[in-house]
Amino acid sequence: IELGRGLTPLPESARTETNKVQGCASQVWMDTRVAPDGAAGPVLTFVGDSDAHIVRGLIAILLAIYSEHAAKDILATDAVRIFEKLGLREHLTPQRSNGFRSMVDRIQRDARAALAAAA
């Protein structure tokens, strides 16, 4: 919850159906920006927000793991495993865990799309 308080608020213009993460019990939006980085491939920057305080904290953790990284590095990073190593998974309900996985899936899907577009 503390980490979530530090998130930059998502502008209303980014709270669209396209940016809405499906599979989350709470309202969750993620906006992705892609920048080319030569031989390293595309770099993705994520911003996100939720109407739930706990979920905002989960978003903050995901942004720390994935945002401003190369698409290939995003695909090579298992956030669920990192989350389990931190001992945080046991503090989430099954519904929140499913939402966390949905956010990870969305980030990885965006990374795959960025790589495909750069090819």
Image (tube, rainbow, N blue to C red):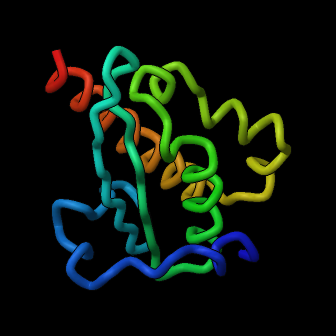
Relative horizontal placement of residue 72, taking residue 2 as reference (left or right): left
Q: How many marks?
A: 0
Coordinates of residue 98 in the picture (x, y in percent) = 51, 49
Question: In the picture, residue 95 is in which quadrant?
Answer: bottom right
Relative horizontal placement of residue 29, taking residue 75 as reference (left or right): left
Relative horizontal placement of residue 99, taking residue 77 as reference (left or right): left
On screen, residue 104 above or below 23: above
Q: Quadrant of the N terminus?
A: bottom right
At 46% from the left and 75% from the top, the residue drawn is 50
Coordinates of residue 70 in the picture (x, y in percent) = 44, 29
On screen, residue 53 above or below 117: below
At 41% from the left and 54% from the top, the residue drawn is 46
At 33% from the left and 58% from the top, the residue drawn is 21
At 36% from the left and 55% from the top, the residue drawn is 23
Q: Residue furthest front?
A: 38
Coordinates of residue 14 in the picture (x, y in percent) = 25, 73
Of 48 and 33, the residue lying toward us = 33
Relative horizontal placement of residue 48, taking residue 88 as reference (left or right): left
Of 61 and 89, the residue lying toward us = 61
Question: In the picture, residue 58 is in which quadrant?
Answer: bottom right
Of 1 and 70, the residue lying toward us = 70
Q: Quadrant of the C terminus?
A: top left
